[in-house]
């Protein structure tokens, strides 16, 4: 961390013991860490955590699997992995036993996200762009004043 902040290790150790506001700001900016989390220990640790898209595509390419990754097959794989996530909840009697199933849920969610990246690549779309477009569209459908605290579909609000 010290090196990435442009500090010698000794200086970093001194500063970290009693960090100044400027140092905290530099830490947050450099590593994308939430200031609230650092100061209060609440909220999200990171302000932004980009998907490791390049790593996912490099993993695929190193194995020459792109040839098998058609949109149809990736859509099928997404559904299968989503079904495996649902298995975590089957016969549970409750919504979730988080402690018991956390590791399995994480692995299935990772598979879903990996296949989502591969699917986006196969149809030639940029994930941040399509998410932003969808969020704007949903914001129009689900006005905060009408949708706040409601699980109703936009057609019922």
Image (cartoon, grey):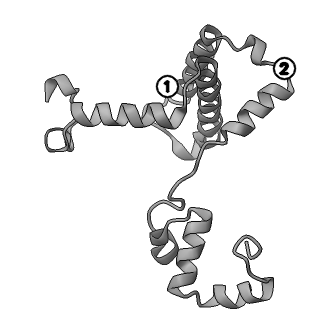
Mark whose residue sits in front, 2 or 1: 2
Does residue 31 sit above or below 82 in this rendering? below
Choose top left, top right, bottom left or bottom right for residue 131.
Answer: top left
Does residue 14 sit above or below 88 in this rendering? below
Please tell me which of labels 2 and 1 falls first in the chain. Answer: 2
Which residue does the numbered mark 1 point to in the structure image?
91
Residue depicted at 66% across the width and 37% down the height = 53
Q: Quadrant of the C terminus?
A: top left
For mark 1, does the 10 Å Cα neighbourhood hold few (<14), some (14 to 19), or many (20 or more) residues? few
Q: Quadrant of the N terminus?
A: bottom right
Left or right placement of residue 139 versus residue 28 in this view: left
Residue depicted at 60% across the width and 8% down the height = 72
Does residue 50 sit above or below 35 in this rendering? above
Q: What is the spatial separation of the Cα atoms under label 2 and label 1, in whole angstroms?
A: 39 Å
Choose top left, top right, bottom left or bottom right for residue 149.
Answer: top left
**Kind of element beneath mark 2:** loop
Looking at the image, can residue 151 be seen? no
Looking at the image, can residue 14 be seen? yes
Residue depicted at 59% across the width and 36% down the height = 105
Outermost residue toward the top in this view? 72
Q: Position of residue 114 (x, y in %)?
A: 65, 31
Q: Position of residue 20 (x, y in %)?
A: 54, 88
Residue depicted at 19% across the width and 43% down the height = 144
Which residue does the numbered mark 2 point to in the structure image?
64
Q: Position of residue 36 (x, y in %)?
A: 45, 71
Q: Position of residue 10 (x, y in %)?
A: 79, 88
Give 155 or 41, whichever is nearer the viewer. Answer: 155
Does residue 10 sit above or below 156 in this rendering? below
């Amino acid at each position: 961390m010290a090196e990435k902040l442009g500090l010698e290790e000794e200086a970093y150790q001194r500063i970290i013991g009693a960090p100044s506001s400027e140092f905290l700001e530099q830490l947050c900016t450099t590593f994308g860490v939430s200031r609230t989390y650092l100061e209060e220990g609440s909220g999200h640790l990171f302000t932004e955590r980009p998907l490791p898209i390049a790593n996912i595509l490099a993993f695929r390419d190193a194995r020459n699997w792109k040839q098998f990754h058609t949109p149809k097959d990736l859509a099928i794989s997404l559904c299968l992995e989503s079904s495996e996530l649902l298995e975590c909840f089957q016969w549970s009697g409750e919504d979730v036993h988080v402690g018991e199933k956390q590791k399995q849920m994480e692995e299935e969610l990772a598979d879903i996200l990996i296949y989502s990246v591969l699917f986006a690549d196969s149809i030639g779309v940029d994930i941040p762009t399509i998410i932003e477009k969808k969020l704007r569209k949903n914001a129009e459908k689900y006005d905060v004043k009408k949708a706040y605290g409601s699980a109703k579909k936009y057609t019922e609000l």
